[in-house]
Amino acid sequence: NEVTFGDYKLADIPNTCVSAIKAVKDLKFNYITIHLSSGIKAIKAAKKVAGSTKLIGVTILTSLDEESLKQIGFDKSINKLVLHQAKLASKANLDGIVCSPKEIKLVKKVFKKEIITPGIRMFKDKKVDQVRTMSPKQAIKNGATALVIGRSLTKGNIEKNIQKLISELK
C-alpha cells in the first residue's frame, strides 16, 4: 500500500487554498497539509473540496520555540496555541493534525483522529533546526499515529539507521 503525502502546508485565503487543492487533485494524494493558521473558513473550504484526500492541519512548526513565537507576535504559549488549533481542526472535521511530539498528549484531549509528528530524532544533531523533538519510541508511546523521520534515517548509512529504528521500537 503506497501512501502519498502532499506536504504543501497551504496557508492562504479560502479561495486560494481551494484552487491549490483542485490543481493537484489529479495527483491523487492520500494526504494534503494546510496550516491551521489559515483560519476556519479556509480550512472548511479546503476540506469540502478535498474529497477522499485526507486534509491534515499543521499546528506550530517544530522549529519554533516560545521566544520565536514572541518574535512573530504571538502572546500565547506553544501549548495554548496548539490546543486552540487542535480544537479548530476538530471543529473543521479534519482527518488529522501535525504537531510536535511534545504536544501529542495535549492534542489527544480535543482531537481524536490521526496525529502525525515531525521532529523525530534517533540521535543528537549538531545543527538542530527543530527544537521540539523526541525519540520515535517516546512519540509512539505518547500516542502518535504516524512519524515523520527525515535526517535520522537518511543521514549516513540508511540501512543501518533503519535497523536502529526497528530495534528501538521493539
Image (cartoon, helix red, strand yellow):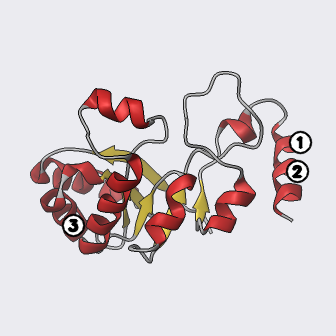
Residue at (34, 35) in percent of width and height: 69
Image quadrant in which you'd find residue 159: top right
Q: Where residue 42 sits: x, y (%)?
A: 16, 57
Proximity of marks 2 and 1: CB atoms separated by less than 8 Å: yes
Name the residue that disc number 2 marks: 163
* Chain-order first, disc 1 or disc 3: 3
17 is higher (above) or lower (below) than 123: below
Q: Residue 49 carries which label?
A: 3
**CA gap, disc 2 and disc 1:** 5 Å
Question: The residue tagged with tag 2: helix, strand or loop?
Answer: helix
Name the residue that disc number 1 marks: 160
In the image, 47 versus 103, the foreground residue is: 103
Residue at (70, 58) in percent of width and height: 138
In the image, 17 versus 37, the foreground residue is: 37
Q: Residue 121 carries which label?
A: none
90 is higher (above) or lower (below) than 10: below
Q: Where residue 65 sits: x, y (%)?
A: 45, 36
Farthest-out residue, top: 127
Residue at (10, 52) in percent of width and height: 15
Q: Where residue 90 sits: x, y (%)?
A: 31, 72
**CA gap, disc 1 and disc 3:** 42 Å
